[in-house]
Amino acid sequence: MISYVTGFMYSPDGSQVVLINKNKPEWQKGKFNGVGGKIEAEESANHAIVREFFEETGVITKLSDWQCFLILTNSNNYRVYMFYTYSEKFNQVKTVEKEIVSLHSVYQLPINIISNLSWLIPLSQDQKIKFNNPIMMFCRS
């Protein structure tokens, strides 16, 4: 099973979110997603989000900055650990690799987003839900 991380960094007031315009994989090309990537061998999901966020935005974060709120899994194919953080560092993000990183209003997300972001972003910001343990959701193939 391949494991991934995806993270949403919000402005401290939660009105803006950092997204990345994906070049790959092909099904995500030209669409916005949270920042993330593959979890490397012997790496925890928490370490992976810190590493991936730095590699793609140039912003250094700590393990304690990130909260895992959801784990999406599809049988034995893949698992995605979804994280969020609120940080004053949101306006320090920059494009480091080939995929463009930018800030977006959570109230007016781009039309060309990965479709599940329309519910993942509000879920991660729902203050009524206490994420002591992440929710696990199983997806069909």
Image: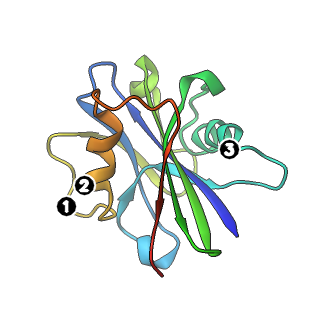
Q: Are marks 3 and 2 in contact (CB under 8 Å)?
A: no
- Circle 3 sits in a helix, a strand or a loop, which is it? helix
**On residue 2, which mark appears?**
none
Question: Which of marks 2 and 3 precedes in the sequence?
Answer: 3
Q: Is residue 98 left or right of residue 43?
A: left
Residue at 25% of width from left, 55% of height from top? 118
Q: How is the image coloured?
A: rainbow
Of residue 94 and residue 117, the one placed in the foreground of this image is: 117
Q: Check if mark 1's residue and mark 3's residue have beta carbons within 8 Å.
A: no
Near-viewer residue (31 or 7) = 7
Q: Is residue 102 left or right of residue 83?
A: left
The tag on residue 118 is: 2
Q: Which mark is residue 111?
A: 1
Residue for point 33% across, 25% down: 11
Amino acid at pointer 3: Ala
- Circle 3 sits on which residue? 48
Label 2: how many Cα within 10 Å (few below 14, some 14–19, many 20+) = few
The spot of residue 55 in percent (x, y) is 64, 43
Q: Amino acid at mark 1?
A: Ile
Local SS, label 1: loop
Dot 1 or dot 2: first in sequence order is 1
